Amino acid sequence: MWLTNSSIGRKVLMSVTGIALILFLTFHACMNVVALIDGDAYNTVCSALGANWYAVVATVALAVLVVIHFVYAIILTLQNRKARGSNRYAVTDKPAKVEWASQNMFVLGVIVVLGLLLHLWNFWFNMMFAEMVNGGYAFVADVPAHDGAALIALTFSNPIYTVIYLVWFVALWFHLTHGFWSAFQTLGLNNKVWFCRWKAIGTAYVTIVMLLFAAVAIGYTCCGGIAA
């Protein structure tokens, strides 16, 4: 099958899964902002998701997307190293401003994955997983697993976690701003005019999403959320 056996097919899989993950991050960022404004409203959303079958199915699907994206990132990185040494993710007419991100996409991806594992430990493990196996209570505190606002407040009451998350958001920003226009280029939705447009759109879009995440982290670190 050309999607898995050819270099172009693997890049298409990388692009499609990457766009899907960006859309999920958009939803996640918008959901998190609710916690910054109204903790009770955020907990209502958490309760609606929880360990319900549709949320579990969506989580499994999301995990599959992450695995596919990361596995093919490794495969393409090894191929690029073999063919062009350290010159990875090379594209034609690549602007100098994305040179650093382009050459360090795999390293950025590793940081992103490590941050994801920490995030899963802090939240998914204490929310959906705890609801399924721990009687509906988080492992780290005596709070209901659907009380996401309390878990956010607990996590970001520690400034070290805040710094780690902000570093993670910066790595995500670099990774996604490059991946955004690169995905559209791979899918053929690009030309010399739209290359600059997709780059500008991607930078603005990803910046907004990352600022939403950062606002929640900083807001809860400084004052426990605006609504607190």
Image (cartoon, grey):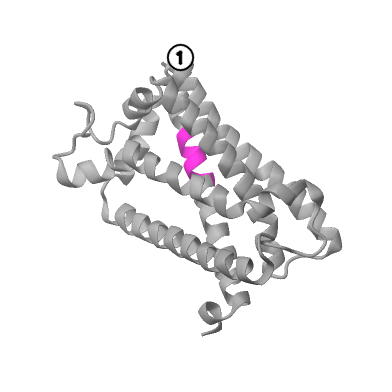
Residue labelled with disc 1:
223
Q: Is residue 110 left or right of residue 191?
A: left
- The crowd level at tag 1 (other Cα within 10 Å; few <14, some 14-19, many 20+) is few
Q: Which residues are magenta?
A: 26-32
Residue 142, compared with residue 209, is above or below; it is: above
Is 192 contained in the magenta span?
no
Toward the right, the furthest residue is 193
> Who is closer to the viewer here, 180 or 96?
96
**Front position in the image: 50 or 82:** 82
Residue at horizontal 50 percent and vertical 62 percent from the top: 69
In the rendered picture of this protein, how many numbered marks are placed on residues?
A: 1
Which residue is at a point 72% across and 64% down the rendered structure image?
185
Seen as rendered, the residue at the extreme left is: 135
- x then y, percent, for residue 213: 52, 34
Q: Main SS type for the magenta part?
A: helix
Q: Is residue 31 visible?
A: yes
Q: Say if the magenta span includes residue 29.
A: yes
- Quarter of the image where the C terminus is located: top left
Q: Quadrant of residue 146?
A: top left
Which amino acid type is marked by label 1?
A: Cys
Residue 143 in percent (x, y) is at 22, 27
> Which of the 4 image quarters holds residue 123?
top left
SS of the residue under disc 1: helix
> Would residue 33 be seen by someone viewing this image from the given angle?
no
Residue 8, above or below 85 = below
| Residue plotted at (72% across, 70% down) | 188
